[in-house]
Image (tube, grey):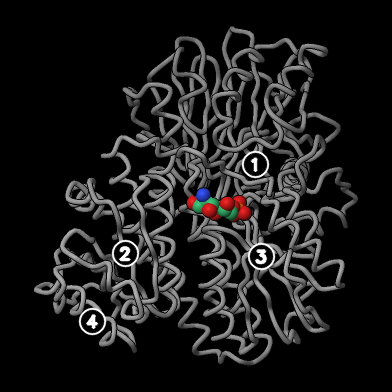
Amino acid sequence: MCGIVGYIGAREASDILVTGLKRLEYRGYDSAGIAVLNGSVKVRKKEGKVSELETVLNGQPVDGSVGMGHTRWATHGVPNDVNAHPHTADNGRFAIIHNGIIENYAVLKKQLAEKGYTFTSDTDTEVLAHFIDDVQKEANLSFAEAVRQALTQVDGAYGLVAVSQDEPDMLVVARNGSPLLLGIGEGEHFIGSDASPFIEYTRNVVYLNDGEMAVVRRNSYEVFKIDGAPVAKEVHALEWDLEEIEKGGYEHFMLKEIMEQPEVLENAMRGRVRLDDNQIRLGGLADVMPQLVNAERIIICACGTSWHAALVGEYLIEKHTRIPVEVEYASEFRYRDPILKDGDVVLVISQSGETADTLAAVRQAQQAGILTLGVVNTVGSTIARETDAGVYLHAGPEIGVASTKAFTAQVVVLTMIALAIGKERGTIDEGTLHTFLQGLTAIPDQIRSVLAQSEQIKELSHDYKTADNFLYLGRGCNFPVALEGALKLKEISYIHAEGYPAAEMKHGPIALIDRFMPVVVIAMKDAIYDKVVSGIEEVAAREGAVIAITEEGNDELDDLCKVVLHVPRSLECLEPLLTVIPLQLLSYYVAVLRDCNVDQPRNLAKSVTVE
Ligand code: M6R
């Protein structure tokens, strides 16, 4: 998730751009850059925070009243000065900035290379810049028309701004899948991924919809569809303040991140889940697929929430590939002299890509000559760089210390990995694969329907805000969800909570149950549903207050449980993607009622880079 800002007017553009970029840093920042028009396109860009770019600008200022800026959160290529945006084409004649992923960039890059184009960065954005140049020259088009025609041939998501020295009094803007809005001023216009870069100048905004473009000048703007048809837009008056805008209008980043999971999972699957030809395309694993197909064992190492995703991954990979899987706490793996042998693969999972224990597991496996794979969110992070191959989550930066959207994105990526290996090994037939791809594709909308119950969950959280203990129970692939639900509650509300496999309750935890003990039970109607219901009966008999998570249409638990929450029916292995959502919301609302610092809980760091 990158940040975009643009300005055209009478003020000094670079000041507005740099201030705007600082406000957009919450969207991710591995590098930043600006382009300002002043006769020619002047680009300044730098790896690191916006303050690093500011240092560059202090030494090499750029004057001009038309420009654009970008904070990058890498999706293609490591974070460095070269991969930072803006990217230019035709010897710097024009520049573009881009938020999103161009899915067919590899095909376009090959075509352009055959025509003699050369590339200095590893980014899909530079490919798009050269492609626009090629389209413009082939048909001798105006700049805006070249951008438009190029975009009709691009697959993927983009929020894009372009400036050209040939037509210096305009910015060309386009949106498909990445947010962009125009700020409407007097003799000046602004562009932003959100309104934070220009909120002090104007509160009048025009939201671009997917598939729309705009040509923005000082005193006018025209909006049209990518197919060229003009669009009449309404101007909206903003009421939010700066902090509200950065959090997307939510009170906390954690809530924003819970709520954005449908889009996050769509991004994680974009271009990878291909229903039409029944394929999973994971470019990052292409080179190692022969080794993966012949793996004798997969060892998954991770910490915290990522370790819970690993447990779901164990079910998924064993089911679809029949390769034995072991899940290890990375912190334990590194110190217990693990037996590693030919045919083993070590897969690590990390949102940050910087967790010290997980990184140590990678290094230990590599010393033993074992293939290492990373499932990582942060592009260019140490784990992403040091593993032999891997798959990015593309979840955007996760700012709340309590991990939410990374968990569901990790489970989706692990599902895709399991299906891809299973297809290659022949352990999953085409029909079953198709059913799973359909199931995955349906998940974002199904999550939307669970999120729609957030008001109900907020209401019921009042009943639990004074609880001292919670028990979470689940079986099969919902057992890791019970662990995750308990961890979420512990870390942000400071209520003690335990997660258990439901059948283990009678081996000990049942002694804890009385009328003061809320027990969250995940009771989906699968093969062991009846056994889970027996567990609920045992809790109810001891006056425990059961909060059941079950599937839509199941009213059998209504008399037995204090609360029943419903999620849509899905394939069993995909259920964690749905059952975890009410648990995230419950812990969030309980923590808010207890007046806890939800985004930065006490004693915790977002990324644990020390032992
Ligand atoms: O960045 P990582 O995924 O490697 O982080 C692992 C854990 O530190 C992390 O999941 C932690 O448990 C979170 N606070 C959970 O919400």
Quadrant in the rendering for residue 512: bottom left
Identify residue for label 3: 332
Q: Nearer the viewer, residue 328 or 24?
A: 328
Nearer-N-terminus badge (2/1): 1
Nearer-N-terminus badge (3/1): 1
Is there a contact, CB below 8 Å, between mark 3 and mark 2? Answer: no
- Disc 4 versus disc 2: nearer the observer: 2
Q: Is residue 273 visible?
A: no
Identify residue for label 2: 471
Disc marking residue 73: 1
| Structural crowding at the residue carrying mark 2, measured as other residues with C-alpha within 10 Å and reported as few (<14), some (14–19) or many (≥20) | many
Nearer-N-terminus badge (3/4): 3
Q: Position of residue 191 (x, y in %)?
A: 53, 26
- Disc 3 versus disc 4: nearer the observer: 3
The residue that appears at 49% across and 39% down in the rendered structure is 179
- Disc 3 versus disc 1: nearer the observer: 3
In the image: residue 476, left or right of residue 351: left
Q: Nearer the viewer, residue 308 or 200?
A: 308
Looking at the rendered structure, the secondary structure element under dot 4 is helix
Q: Is residue 428 visible?
A: yes
Quadrant in the rendering for residue 448: bottom left
| Structural crowding at the residue carrying mark 1, measured as other residues with C-alpha within 10 Å and reported as few (<14), some (14–19) or many (≥20) | many
Q: Position of residue 364 (x, y in %)?
A: 80, 65
Residue 576 vertical position relative to residue 267 in the rendered view, above or below: below
Identify residue for label 4: 533
The Cα–Cα distance between marks 2 and 1, rounded to whole angstroms, is: 38 Å
- Disc 1 versus disc 4: nearer the observer: 4
Looking at the rendered structure, the secondary structure element under dot 3 is helix
Q: Amino acid at mark 3?
A: Glu
